[in-house]
Image: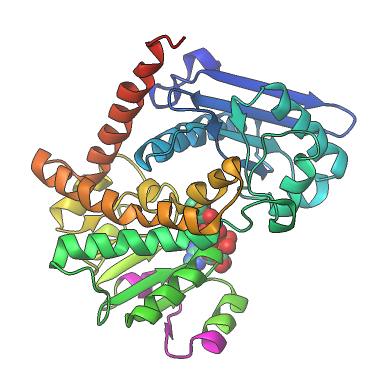
Amino acid sequence: MGVFEAPANLTGHEQVVFCQDKNSGLKAIIAVYSTALGPALGGTRFYPYDNEEDAVRDALDLSKGMAYKASLAGLDLGGGKAVIWGDPVADKSEALLRAYGRFVESLGGRYITACDVGTYVQDMDVIAKETRHATGRSVENGGAGDSSVLTAYGVYSGMRAAAEHRWGSADLAGRTVGVAGIGKVGRYLIGHLLEEGATVVATDISEQARAWLSTTHPQATFVDDTDALITSDIDIYAPCALGGALNDDTVPVLRAKVVVGAANNQLAHPGIEKMLAERGILYAPDYLVNSGGVIQVSDEIDGFNFERAKRRASQIFDITGRLLRTADSEGVPPAVAADRMAERRMAECGRLRSILLP
Ligand code: NAD
């Protein structure tokens, strides 16, 4: 795929950098979608792609998503993302991570990295030996630590806003929430839900996750799989595993009237947002409600302060409410309204830089 001839949904990137260090085996692609609102922040995915085209496509797609996420969350950040093409278990080494860090540094702060699939806080500590532009480092090293804490808090805040929009009350007590994916985010989310008095039904493919649920929260119910979860009597569905949770098979049978979850790219393809609206299911856009993670790690840029980051993440409640009302008044699904709001802020605030300062 020629970068300049990429499909329409992937074009428009400011900069795409290919990085190679033969000695350590590093092959990385850093994609900067936009710096209209500030430095392009986004994680580094370490993944054994089948081919180079898939790696490029993922970097382009994910970096665009980050720009929209930061914009809608009201952050002064652009959108970027990087992929390291390789097997994180077999190929990761100190030299490879540090070589990558040097490439990040070479961009002079236009791109700021963080964790993603296949990279962890310990990796960011290593990368940060070579660059000032790494977030998501460990708390011992001045970092924000595990971003799933505020991701879950943001999802919970977005869920309360969606409940208020749908039922007139943000209170989740007495509501039944189906959580698919009892991973890092799912676990914190389940904690918030139970604390508020919601009933939790959850599923995961991992035995270890099932054991964690029955030991930590015996009052929650475990169901065998996602099909059983979405066809059970739930008010709210929270996809917290992989992308594509809302698709041609799941939306027609979904019992929930509200969908709010952490997983990225929940809509399997364009048009699903209309199917949800036609079935009267309120969908809070994934990249808005899961922006607590980027809020958490971006706080490191100013010297990490958990309480400040949490206050920022709690604004997801207000932004979600505003977005859902805007979608109603514009007569479009929330996913469409979210894209419009994100694009508007990038255009309006990004334009201000054309006013020359002394
Ligand atoms: P995780 O890997 O810790 O947890 C994912 C869980 O989903 C695992 O327990 C896994 O066993 C389970 N799972 C996988 N396939 C499943 C299936 N078919 N059915 C049921 N369960 C399944 O990941 P996480 O950090 O908790 O992230 C969850 C989702 O939220 C991901 O899509 C991630 O991209 C997104 N997200 C995470 C963050 C963050 O800060 N961690 C931020 C934004 C978005």
Q: Is 189 drawn above or below residue 241 in the view shown?
A: below
In the picture, the quarter occupied by the N terminus is top right
In this image, 26 relative to 73: left or right?
right
Query: Across the whole image, how many numbered discs are drawn on residues?
Result: 0
Residue placed most toward the observer, 284 or 208:
284
> Can you tell which quarter of the image residue 255 is in?
bottom left
Query: At 54% across and 46% down in the image, what residue appears?
Result: 299
Highlighted magenta segment, given as a residue range: 214-230
Residue placed most toward the observer, 221 or 37:
37
Query: At 56% across and 65% down in the image, what residue appears?
Result: 184
Q: Is 209 drawn above or below residue 215 in the view shown?
A: above
Q: Position of residue 149 (x, y in %)?
A: 52, 62
In this image, 322 relative to 122: left or right?
left
14 in the magenta segment: no
Q: Position of residue 51 (x, y in %)?
A: 65, 33
Query: At 72% across and 46% down in the image, what residue appears?
Result: 124
Q: Position of residue 153 (x, y in %)?
A: 43, 63
Among all residues in the image, which is located at the extreme front? Answer: 358
Query: At 82% across and 49% down in the image, what residue appears?
Result: 90
Residue placed most toward the observer, 233 or 150:
150
> Can you tell which quarter of the image residue 232 is in?
bottom left
Among all residues in the image, which is located at the extreme right? Answer: 23
In this image, 108 relative to 8: left or right?
right
Chosen colour scheme: rainbow
Note whether residue 283 is visible: yes
